[in-house]
Amino acid sequence: MDWSQVEVAVPHASRVATPIPGVHMAGFRYDGTDPVDISMVAHPAVTLLFDLGVHRWSVEDGAGTPGPGDVAIGLLPDDVRLTGSDPGECLQVRLSPVLAARILDTSALVGTVAGLDDVLGPAAGQLSADLRDAGSWDERFDLMFRFLAGRLDGRRTVDPEVAYVWQQIHLRHGRSGVHALAEETGWSRQRLWSRFRAQVGLSPKQAARLVRFDHAARLLALGSSPAEAAARAGYADQPHLTREVRSIVGTTPVDIATKPWLAIDQEAWPTLMRQAADGPPETPRLTAPGRAMLGRAAPRVRC
C-alpha cells in the first residue's frame, strides 16, 4: 500500500457544532493503485468504521473472515485488517469505552468485530447513507457529532466511579494502582473490578495495560528508542516492553516504530500524539465520587 497517497482530514473545533468529550474522529481518502491492507492495532477506544467509497472495502476479523467495511471494532481486537483493491474513503470514529457503553446498543465490545447495525440499531444504515452523500469532510464530521450527541439523551448510564477510574487510568497513561483507585472511589477492590468490567469490558488492570501500551507505541512512533519508551511508559525495562508488545500485537517495539499507520496517526490524532510526547495534561485535581463532600453532588468527569 502506498501511504503517500493517503489524505487525512480532521475536525476543526470552530466548525463543529457539538463536540463531545471522549470522541475523536478522522477521515481518510486513498487514491493509490496498490491494494489496501491496514492492520487495526489495539488502542484504548472502541472504533466505529464507516466505509464511504464507491468501491467498498472489507474488514477481516481475527479468523481471516471478510465482512463489510462498516463495522464496530472492540477493545483488544485480534488481528483485524482493512483490505481493498481500489481507492476509497472511510471515516474512523474512536469512542472512549465509557462513552461507548452509553451510546452503543450492546454490552462492551472486547476482542470482537460487530456490524454497525448491531451496535447502532436501524439508524446505522441511514447514517452511513447520509455520510456518503455529504459534500465535505466538515459536513460528515458535523453529522457524526450530532448523531452521537442525540444518542446520549435518556440512554444507559455509567457509574460515576467507573467513569472516574477510566479517566484516571487515561490521564496517568496506565500507571495507576487498582487498590489506590478503589480507595479513591470509596469502593472495595472487588466491587470496582466487577462494575468496571461489566461496563467497560475490561478489568481496571487490563485497561491500564492497554493504555500504557498505547502510550509506548506513540512514543516509539515519535522517535523514542525502545529503552526510552519503556522507561517513560513505566515498564520495568526494555524486555518487559518487548513482551507486552508481542503479547498485544504480535510484533516488536522496533517494528512498531516503523509502522506507517503510526506516522499517519500524527496527522489523524494530533491531540493523542501530543499527550504521548508531553505527558498527562495539566488538569485540576478532581474529587473522586467516593470522596465528594457530604451534601454536594459528585463531579462530572470526562470520558
Image (cartoon, rainbow, N blue to C red):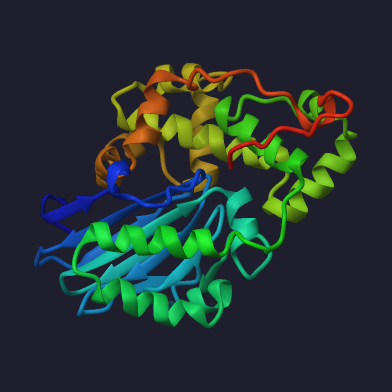
Residue toward you, 239 or 101: 101
Of the pair 154 and 4, the residue shown nearer to us: 154
The structure residue drawn at horizontal position 19% and vertical position 74%, both measured from the top left corner, is: 85
Left or right position of 6 against 92: left
Question: Which residue appears at 89% of the width and 40% of the height?
Answer: 190
Left or right placement of residue 299 versus residue 224 in this view: right
Rendered residue at 49%/38% (across/down): 245
Residue 268 located left or right of residue 242: left
Nearer-the-camera pick, 52 or 177? 52
Q: Report the residue that reaches farthest toward the front.
A: 295
Residue 78 seen by the camera: no
- The image shows residue 266 at horizontal and vertical percentages of 28, 37
Quadrant of the image occupied by residue 132: bottom left
Q: Quick check: can you spot residue 248?
A: yes
Rendering coords of residue 65 (x, y %)? 45, 77
Q: Residue at x 54, y 20 (%)?
A: 283
The image shows residue 172, relative to residue 30, as above or below, that is: above
Instruction: Please state the horizontal and vertical placement of residue 73, each as a whole percent of the image.
Output: 50, 62
Q: Residue 36's spot in the image, x, y percent?
A: 23, 65
